[in-house]
Image (tube, grey):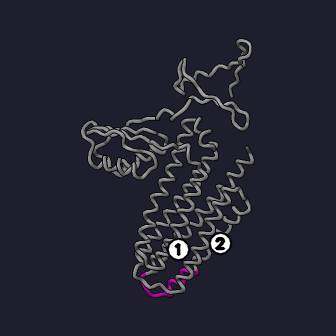
Amino acid sequence: METRKIQKTGGSTYIVSLPKYWVAGAKLKEGDSVSMSVDSAGTLVVDPVTGGRRPAVSIEVFVDDEENSLHFLRRLIGLYVTGYDEIVVRSRGRIPTETRTAVRDFTRRVIGPQIVEESASAITILDVADHSHLDMRKILKRMHLMARSMHGDAIEAMVEGNAELAADVVARDDEVDRLYWFMSKQQGMMMRDPGMVRKIGVSVPEATYYLSASKALERIADHAARIALRAGALAGEKLPEKVVAEARAYSATVVSVLDRSVESMLKGDLKVANDVVDEAETLRGRREPFMRLLMDQKGRFAVPLTLIMESLERTALYSADIAEIGINLAGNHAKA
């Protein structure tokens, strides 16, 4: 920590000099203005941004003609979550059609980035979203509601043999991904710009816990999509009532564990969090009787249902991860 002496100038004005490295890092110069505010703890906050949007963090990427378009899409997502606001895609010649398709796919799959300039050899993508506007806790709540809805609909698609509903569940997985990447970018921006910590409203350690929980929710949504895919394969199959009843009961318990894991994390309820972790472990024991039940049945549904049960089990374990993250977050709050 660095300390500086307060100096008095004139009759009633006190001044403190700003560190040179901070001024350089904020790209300020003599004559520029900064804004000052006092937070709830009485700390004076000096912000180089005096209004409007902070300067865009830009990067140029050059297209490799031999690079797979899917790999390039992943590279763009990586730059997005790192915290870049402006991505300029360049090529020494004409940008390949596959690359342009990947760029457009990127802008559809994430929140904020839009193509603002385009030529034969360059594409400029600018993130127009206000990433300090959405609270991380609200994003987690939204992801939780979407993931639990996907799981419920996936099981109903399996029971009803509803291929259309199953396809809808798979499509919704992209929306959960968008929210996870959005939160990832929030943390990336906080790491690059300390001023974003105050604007987003959580500390960097807190953001790390929330991001870890959002990753678990993203995985849970992935498993809901997998259940839906298996449900689509079961379309037209008549499932035995015993199998349907057990699958529904197991799913309801898993969703209950998921609900309580998120609730315990957001409320800092250590008792509920520990109960969730314990119950998630006991759910493993319910899988074996179900497997024996499947072996006693005849039909083509044994393998898809086995994979569905595995996804439900993984959902419970990811929910336990969220509860454990909540326990760690509560410890961080106690330390603070």
Taking the image as shown, residue 118 lies to the left or right of residue 85, namely: left
Question: Three-letter amino acid code at disc 1?
Answer: Met
- Residue beneath the point at 37% across and 38% down: 88
User: In the visual, does 97 lie left or right of 291?
Assistant: left
In the rendered image, which residue does mark 2 sit on? 282
- Please tell me which residue lies in front, 130 or 163: 130
Q: Residue at x 31, y 38 (%)?
A: 122
Disc 2 residue type? Thr
Residue 124 rendering spot, x and y as whole percentages: 36, 39
Q: Judging from the image, what secondary structure is the residue with disc 2 in?
A: helix
User: Is residue 84 found inside the magenta-colored segment of the image?
Assistant: no
Residue at mark 1: 309
Residue 119's spot in the image, x, y percent?
A: 28, 38
- Residue depicted at 62% across the width and 75% down the height: 285
In the rendered structure, find residue 24 and report the number of the disc placed on it. Answer: none
Q: Which residues are magenta?
A: 289-300
